[in-house]
Image (tube, coloured by chain):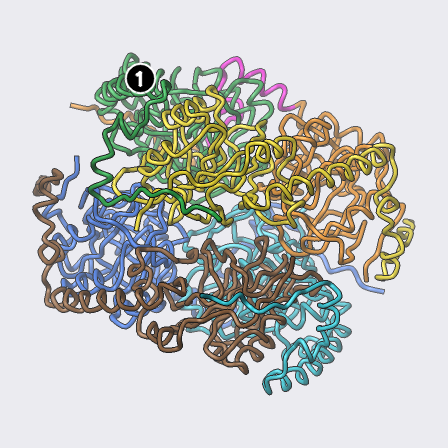
Chain colours: A blue, B brown, C cyan, D green, E yellow, F orange
Amino acid sequence: MNIVFRNTPRAPAAVVAGFAEFGVATVHEAQGRTGLLAPYMRPIFSGNRICGSAVTVSVAPCDNWMIHVAVEQCRPGDIMVVAPTSASDAGYFGELLGQSLHAHGVKGLVIDAGCRDIRELKELGFPVWSRCVYAQGTVKETLGSVNTPVVCAGALVNPGDIIVADDDGVCVVPRLEAAATIEKCGAREQKEAKVRARLRAGELGLDIYDMRKRLAERGLVYQDAPSEK
Amino acid sequence: MNIVFRNTPRAPAAVVAGFAEFGVATVHEAQGRTGLLAPYMRPIFSGNRICGSAVTVSVAPCDNWMIHVAVEQCRPGDIMVVAPTSASDAGYFGELLGQSLHAHGVKGLVIDAGCRDIRELKELGFPVWSRCVYAQGTVKETLGSVNTPVVCAGALVNPGDIIVADDDGVCVVPRLEAAATIEKCGAREQKEAKVRARLRAGELGLDIYDMRKRLAERGLVYQDAPSEK
Amino acid sequence: MNIVFRNTPRAPAAVVAGFAEFGVATVHEAQGRTGLLAPYMRPIFSGNRICGSAVTVSVAPCDNWMIHVAVEQCRPGDIMVVAPTSASDAGYFGELLGQSLHAHGVKGLVIDAGCRDIRELKELGFPVWSRCVYAQGTVKETLGSVNTPVVCAGALVNPGDIIVADDDGVCVVPRLEAAATIEKCGAREQKEAKVRARLRAGELGLDIYDMRKRLAERGLVYQDAPSEK
Amino acid sequence: MNIVFRNTPRAPAAVVAGFAEFGVATVHEAQGRTGLLAPYMRPIFSGNRICGSAVTVSVAPCDNWMIHVAVEQCRPGDIMVVAPTSASDAGYFGELLGQSLHAHGVKGLVIDAGCRDIRELKELGFPVWSRCVYAQGTVKETLGSVNTPVVCAGALVNPGDIIVADDDGVCVVPRLEAAATIEKCGAREQKEAKVRARLRAGELGLDIYDMRKRLAERGLVYQDAPSEK
Amino acid sequence: MNIVFRNTPRAPAAVVAGFAEFGVATVHEAQGRTGLLAPYMRPIFSGNRICGSAVTVSVAPCDNWMIHVAVEQCRPGDIMVVAPTSASDAGYFGELLGQSLHAHGVKGLVIDAGCRDIRELKELGFPVWSRCVYAQGTVKETLGSVNTPVVCAGALVNPGDIIVADDDGVCVVPRLEAAATIEKCGAREQKEAKVRARLRAGELGLDIYDMRKRLAERGLVYQDAPSEK
Amino acid sequence: MNIVFRNTPRAPAAVVAGFAEFGVATVHEAQGRTGLLAPYMRPIFSGNRICGSAVTVSVAPCDNWMIHVAVEQCRPGDIMVVAPTSASDAGYFGELLGQSLHAHGVKGLVIDAGCRDIRELKELGFPVWSRCVYAQGTVKETLGSVNTPVVCAGALVNPGDIIVADDDGVCVVPRLEAAATIEKCGAREQKEAKVRARLRAGELGLDIYDMRKRLAERGLVYQDAPSEK
């Protein structure tokens, strides 16, 4: 059955906003190294860092009909997540849909397929993370679903999950774990700030992390390189 | 037999120039979703949009001899299209050949192989769409042909066909259909301009394209998300 | 046995510095078309050209422990080269390690695996050439080696070899051939400078390289395109 | 948290057995074209068709520790499904683990990573569907989970879901939809049997499926090929 | 415009039959190293060698409607060649269509997309060369064309061209060059038979092909390996 | 400089023969998980297990001239290892060269490029591990080297190293470590034989390897699946 779920729950705006200062690597680490989409998901232009609640869209191969349907279910601050039911490079998304999402306050798009109108989307300032850039058109013949769970680029995304995306890629945070994850992100950043200061001063990770003893126990051998004649 | 065809017909300059205002996605759509080269063809630097008549070059694997031969057959405004007879990542093309084509008024290069001297070609302002960036050198031992039909990145290109290339990729337009395609591009752009204005104003594609009835007929179900306890 | 070689020989500073003016394509050609790493090795941000002595690091799959160990073996001007013993996309390297290498004067990193914290590394100005961008974290459980010979992206790299990297990719020069290679690079550049001037003036490679006779001997046929009715 | 769920529910044996006569393509179609794992999942030797209840295993990159843990949770007739948390080609599974699973009545393995000891597993008659064949060893250092939901080769698999695998690949059926899916498979097979008989007799699909009118409405043109002079 | 060309010319049956004794490598070489489809085109089961006249089918992405249309245009001895207008892994072809083509005397299928029902097609003895094996279903919504020129896996195929396929892959021979190519194949095979006999007797290619002098002229150096202490 | 080293040292015949009973996975493990070639190296037909001394061949892209040169340097029991200086899918090797190597007692070929004449090589019983199957012909224009160190599919191979290849892939053993590696292989097999017997009897790896305590220490939680209503 093809279904559009309306009014799916989202995390409180304050929680979503809490991710604004954290990058994908931090969030991924903070939640136990889970949630990353595959590394082939790349931004169509660099320099963006966004977070928001997922509106999920399951689309048929080479058919972007349900993206039009899904726009109506988006709220300002959301991020649209599109997953075809079969792998496709086709260009499901271009500037006109970008204008539409932009007009509804959507922050960006994550699509496990192709995107087109790169120049225009960049001018519009609408960020997209996609599998590839390809101008191949799609049809509007087959139904899909909106706001059902989807597997996007190898990661399970439920509607209302938090999406964090930057130049490192895309990470998904389960909605009900969002608040706890933000705390862990903050703790991690604080810890890293101290380490960063020491590393900048030239201290070695070997000493900061106290690795020497464990390396020796494992049997690491240090030796001067053989002299040359 | 290896052959160089001279004075292959080109579309009238006014027709070629007519493509200047249209992007790859528009041209691809206007001619019935045909003509795209494979999505792995990417610009070596972004921000270019060019159109011109194809000078086609069929080269042996890892052998760029015929590119030198083909320069002589180029006219100002042309675009060179190079296709190896067997897939190769080798760097057939670099800055010196870029200087040569630039000096003869060639607008750019489309090559289903590697390109090198990226920094220098960017400084020169000579755009290239290639399969990859790779410095691997090539030899000059085996003949090929110039201005014969080639298959480049999955698309058939005849000499004199119109090439349109931008950040979305590369599209080829058969020479004799060029004028008709421009008209269709214009019509498409006009139609899109109206839709764009409405989408920017927040109207939904669902309403603009009158999709709701057809979606219902196909059986799309709308439902509020189950409430959470 | 896992080993860290200390004080591995490096080429004299003046020799290393001699590569500063040459790009990857030139160096690759000058040493007989050898030394290139695979074309999938791309810079995480463009516009850099670096050269330096290799500190090699052999790491276990998804384990970046030895990178920490290797920092201590680096000297100002070195370039770190990391090769996993089994192919991996994981993000072995991020901003903190970048800070550490930067503090020790290391010029850049070449890693046949993933890199993360792209934005921060770009802000820091620390260039990386990697197989991919991916935030996936790694562990610190298994030993590897430092300054042993490694195969990185298909190329053999010995500690102390010269690494040259720019937007075209990465090339390795055996340490003991470095001085001779610089001479060949210079000779090649001088020759190219002359050819460049002639090509810019519109002369054809066909004439500059005196190719016409050899093409004819091989049987290349020139013919006017058939006229159209 | 790393967890092993014991005694996860399975579909009744009679229901699981009901899939024995249906292939992957039939099951995929019967449940609305869902459930397929990515096409890179190939059998290590051909000629098998198995079905069973999934025991899911989430493993760390290049670490097969949890496969040992999962064996204990398997029951006769089950199929083990292994998904690394980061893509890997490493050989997580070989003959010894095959012997172990075989001894516990497990029907086969589906693993989104590498497999080794192909010859021995074939002699044992233990079928495996894997991403690749690779002898690269793995470690036993990092925990994972057993019988939690996993994404395997792009498909969501819950413990107790039905796995169907044959030379066409792998398909997953949600446990609670298994009975209904069998019915649909049966209906589909009956319908196909009739069509098969007619096709074998030389009738055209055009006529059996009554396509001619719809083709004409869509504008398909039939025309004799131009005669040649 | 979508069109079905009927009664496209084929080479005389005697000419087509003339290819029966030659493999793909021989044919490819005989016609000047042209005509090969990409190496990703693999047989779904090995041991077949077929030749026949191409019936070409251009299909929309993930839409196999036109294959049904094309069956009617096939004659005994033909080979169907299917090319999607956009790259796709979907399973356009399975056992039922195999039964239909088999009933009409078609010798095999070449498809630049996915195939399914591998086991059944093998039992039927209907050979297929495809991009991949994948059970993903397709729709019947969008028109394509039959017996127009197509680009299939990087090779231009015109209706009536000769297709030769075996375990090495697929090669296409332009119809009007078919007779001449057979002659060249025969000459090549005769020449190879003599060389084969000499090689089997232990003679070296170096001597048979008289390579030693040319190698020396090019500067090849022979040297005993350095002795080991 | 292009060079052919004659009479490169090989391991004693008895040592080479010692590998006959061990598979690729065992050898790879025994030498500390090193020496594997990339997983894309696959046998052109299955069921072979060979070992022998490497004769290495460095060839130019799409040029198989040096393979002819290398035949003369082969001795009965050797295995030829071919590595192009730039990645290539071309079919460097076919039945005639197979006849030649077979006549000289060479056991098989490992080539990081394409192979052709699959059917004939299978009939001849000459095993090949290659990157792909492709009929694309190569030229004989550019020199390479024989019996110099090469990087083949990511692994460094020196002349005289031991090559072990079977359905799992290909592994290289440094010549001077060959004898020691055989001992380790034997020890490993003995240990595995005992484990195999216990696993076949249904014992768990958890108990055989005494893993339960360490799993608990790391924090693995066991829990019954939640009951369903």
Whole-percent x, y for residue C9 in the image: 73, 67
Q: Is residue A174 above or below residue F24?
A: below
Q: Residue at label 1?
A: D193
Whole-percent x, y for residue C189 in the image: 68, 80
Along the viewing direction, whichever of B154 and B131 lies nearer the viewer: B154
Q: Is residue A133 above or below residue E129?
A: below
Residue at point 50%, 41% (across, down): D62
Magenta stretch?
A: F191-214
**Magenta stretch contains residue B96:** no
Residue at point 26%, 46% (across, down): A157
Query: Where the N terminus of chain F falls, by quadrant?
Result: bottom right
Whole-percent x, y for residue E64 in the image: 33, 37
Q: Main secondary structure of the magenta part?
A: helix
Residue type at tag 1: Ala
Query: Where the C terminus of chain F falls, by quadrant?
Result: top left
Along the viewing direction, whichever of E210 and B161 lies nearer the viewer: B161
Q: Secondary structure at mark 1?
A: helix
